[in-house]
Image: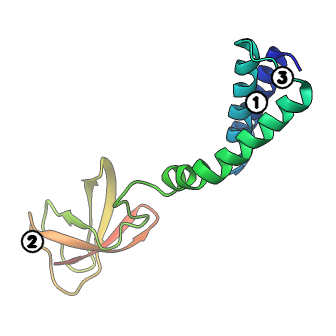
Amino acid sequence: MTWWSWMILGAVLLGAELFAIDAQFYLVFLGISAALVGLASLLGVAMPEWAQWMAFALLSLTAFFTFRKSLYEKVRGGAVGFKATLSGNTVNVIEELAPGAETRLEYRGTRWTVRNVGSVPIAAGARATVVAVDGLTLRIEAE
């Protein structure tokens, strides 16, 4: 195949990764391998067609087994220390909150409704623990 055919194949594979629901980076490494074979042909490395396909296969398999797992875990695993739930986090209550009462406060850049589900009032300026999240309502208790 000509160098530009490999580059087109690489671009199509990389583009397909964007539209696949969860391709798990398999198409990324196929696309990169195709682009590398195209780049080698462009730079003058003369290979018969069978050698181009063999190089494509070897580059793809090497990339799969060397880089895919760690890259996929970094991208899909989330940030270090990130918790998927807000339960257990603490918030600062800006006004006194009696048991069962609600108010609004800002937490992590978002306005939330908070409800005191504990049996003791929470003083203004005190910290409270998030017990559960119900939609856009944080259920909190005094610390």
Disc nearest the viewer among 3 and 1 = 3
Whole-number angstrom distance, CA of label 2 to CA of label 1: 63 Å
What numbered label is drawn on residue 47? 3
Residue under label 2, please give it: 123
Asked whether 27 or 67 is in front, the reply is 67
**Helix, strand, or loop for circle 2?**
loop
Residue 131 in percent (x, y) is at 32, 77
Horizontally, residue 63 falls left or right of residue 73, namely: right
Disc nearest the viewer among 3 and 2 = 3
Disc nearest the viewer among 2 and 1 = 1
* Circle 1 residues within 10 Å: few <14, some 14–19, many ≥20: many
Asked whether 86 or 136 is in front, the reply is 86
Horizontally, residue 30 falls left or right of residue 67, namely: right
Whole-number angstrom distance, CA of label 3 to CA of label 2: 76 Å
Residue under label 1, please give it: 34
Dot 3 or dot 2, earlier in sequence: 3
Residue 83 appears in the rendering: yes
Q: Amino acid at mark 1?
A: Ala
**Helix, strand, or loop for circle 1?**
helix
**Helix, strand, or loop for circle 3?**
loop
> The N terminus lies in which quarter of the figure?
top right
In terms of image quadrants, where is residue 14? top right
Q: Amino acid at mark 3?
A: Met
Dot 3 or dot 1, earlier in sequence: 1
> The C terminus lies in which quarter of the figure?
bottom left
